[in-house]
Image: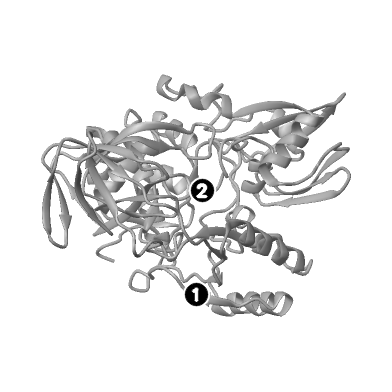
């Protein structure tokens, strides 16, 4: 089984490199030199969609649709995207609007929708908007491949490239919008498809699922990790693909993206002997609960306590993603988030008690962390990141926290009172990229705000650093999965 993964959407020309590469076109194959240039197209009409992930009842989705139409008079429709994987998957519904002519129009409409929703609509059911274009966004426009000196080699609406030893995309984006964002030369096997995209040129990698997973386990972490951890990471990733394929990217010509929104995937550049072995030893193994594929989410460092699904995304509370202390001993009683963040609980992801291997030194600062902002600095940051005018902030009030201490709703008090809902929205609002997590406290010292926090990521499901340390302590893949996904069982997805 093949899957299609978005690698990038360049708004500028970029270079690719491959030996014995050929471009497959309707008119036939064209030989491509080892190094060449791909030219982008230009962005066109932007559309807007509203997404309600994991609404497992059509009646529930229909009720929200009727509410929105009643409150706004907008032209909205309900869509069930993705695949149900022969009845083993999970039904989802999205509420979709008509397309807009600009991103500004779309955002204005989104803000209007949010204002009109009644107060009794739960925060976890909030609207999450995303910009998209109908594909192909430029039906009359071609993409072009050129030699380094500018000679055109081929031009078409869609070009599919293949090279036996793989194709390198030069300066591909890694970790987009996050604090580790950078550019890197990445090599991919399978088919590389180039076509007009929202920004310019969209690059898609079509690849067998198991080869994709052999890269994901070490793109997400490291191929130097113990085999038992890599096996657990691979099974969680396989389960996530099976549960979400075709649902996160409705209307787009790919199943998944290669970033944190779906799963980190950096091609054969990340595949090593141990990561390949982990994929082969677990081939087909998938987590299932009550006959349904488990949406086995995971994050880098929970900080000590795992979060519930519905406090991060929407109204869905599977028993295998429950709040739980990530430690070898008794549960940790979180009486006060401030004490918890200042504490050093005996949990698997605590680098002071369970030292990380040297190759994970970069993760150590994110078990507990802090930032300091001046009043005007924070006001400027909020204005830049959210458009919120929070000048002369007098207070920031935490309205609701999840079970792990992660903030899911807060209010900023200044000239106006501004409410921010959503774990990821809060992380984005208080950082130029993202805060490591939304599990933090805010203290006022003079004119400064001191933010002290715990963990890295949303905290739902498997704590990757905790699972790593469990494997280093001798726990097996099955024991790791049982710890992080209780009530889920392992089955062979392709035979069940």
Q: Is residue 354 visible?
A: yes
Residue under pointer 1: 79
Image: 234 above or below 149: below
Which quadrant would the C terminus be assigned to in this image? bottom left
Image: 111 above or below 357: below
Quarter occupied by residue 493: bottom left
Q: Give the x, y percent position of residue 460.
A: 55, 48
Q: Is residue 406 visible?
A: no
- 482 sits to left or right of 366: left
Residue sitting at x 77%, y 38%: 336
Quarter occupied by residue 198: bottom left
The secondary structure type at the circle numbered 1 is strand
- Please tell me which residue lies in front, 165 or 263: 165
Give the mark nearest the N terminus, 1 or 2. 1
- Please tell me which residue lies in front, 243 or 282: 243
- 430 sits to left or right of 159: right
The secondary structure type at the circle numbered 2 is loop
Residue sitting at x 61%, y 41%: 305
Image: 83 above or below 232: below
Residue sitting at x 61%, y 47%: 424
Foreground mark, 1 or 2, reads: 1
Residue under pointer 2: 461
């Amino acid at each position: 089984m093949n899957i299609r993964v978005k690698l990038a959407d360049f708004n500028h020309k970029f270079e690719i490199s491959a030996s014995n590469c050929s471009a497959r076109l309707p008119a036939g194959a064209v030989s491509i030199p080892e190094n060449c240039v791909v030219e982008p197209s230009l962005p066109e009409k932007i559309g807007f969609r509203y997404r309600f992930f994991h609404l497992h009842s059509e009646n529930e989705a229909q009720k929200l649709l009727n509410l929105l139409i009643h409150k706004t008079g907008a032209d909205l429709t309900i869509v069930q995207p993705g695949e149900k994987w022969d009845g083993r998957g999970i039904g989802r519904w999205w509420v979709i609007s008509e397309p807009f002519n600009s991103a500004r129009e779309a955002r204005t409409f989104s803000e209007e929708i949010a204002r009109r929703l009644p107060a009794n609509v739960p925060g976890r059911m909030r609207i999450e908007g995303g910009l998209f274009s109908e594909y192909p966004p430029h039906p009359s426009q071609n993409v072009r491949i050129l030699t380094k000196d500018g000679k055109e080699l081929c031009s078409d609406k869609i070009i599919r490239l293949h090279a036996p030893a793989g194709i390198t995309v030069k300066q591909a984006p890694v970790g987009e919008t996050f604090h580790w964002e950078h550019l890197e030369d990445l090599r991919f096997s399978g088919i590389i498809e180039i076509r007009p995209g929202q920004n310019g040129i969209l690059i898609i990698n079509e690849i067998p699922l198991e080869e994709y997973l052999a890269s994901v386990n070490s793109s997400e972490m490291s191929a130097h990790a113990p085999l038992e951890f890599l096996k657990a990471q691979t099974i969680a990733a396989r389960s996530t693909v099976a549960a979400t394929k075709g649902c996160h990217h409705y209307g787009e010509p790919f199943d998944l993206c290669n970033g944190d929104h779906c799963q980190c995937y950096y091609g054969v550049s990340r595949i090593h002997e141990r990561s390949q072995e982990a994929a082969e030893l677990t081939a087909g193994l998938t987590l299932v609960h009550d006959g349904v594929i488990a949406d086995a989410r995971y994050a880098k460092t929970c900080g000590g306590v795992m979060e519930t699904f519905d406090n991060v995304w929407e109204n869905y509370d599977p028993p295998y993603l429950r709040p739980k202390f990530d430690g070898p001993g008794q549960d940790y009683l979180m009486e006060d988030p401030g004490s918890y963040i200042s504490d050093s609980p005996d949990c698997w992801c605590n680098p002071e008690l369970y030292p990380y291997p040297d190759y994970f030194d970069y993760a150590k600062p994110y078990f507990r962390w802090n930032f300091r902002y001046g009043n005007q600095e924070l006001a400027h940051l909020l204005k830049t990141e959210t458009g919120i005018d929070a000048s002369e902030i007098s207070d920031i009030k935490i309205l609701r926290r999840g079970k792990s201490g992660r903030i899911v709703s807060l209010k900023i008090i200044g000239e106006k009172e501004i409410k921010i809902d959503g774990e990821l929205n809060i992380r984005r609002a208080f950082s130029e990229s993202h805060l490591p997590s939304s599990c933090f406290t805010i203290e006022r010292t003079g004119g400064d705000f001191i933010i002290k926090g715990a963990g890295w990521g949303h905290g739902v499901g498997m704590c990757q650093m905790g699972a790593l340390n469990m494997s280093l302590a001798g726990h097996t893949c099955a024991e790791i999965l049982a710890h992080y996904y209780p009530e889920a069982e392992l089955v062979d997805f392709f035979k069940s």
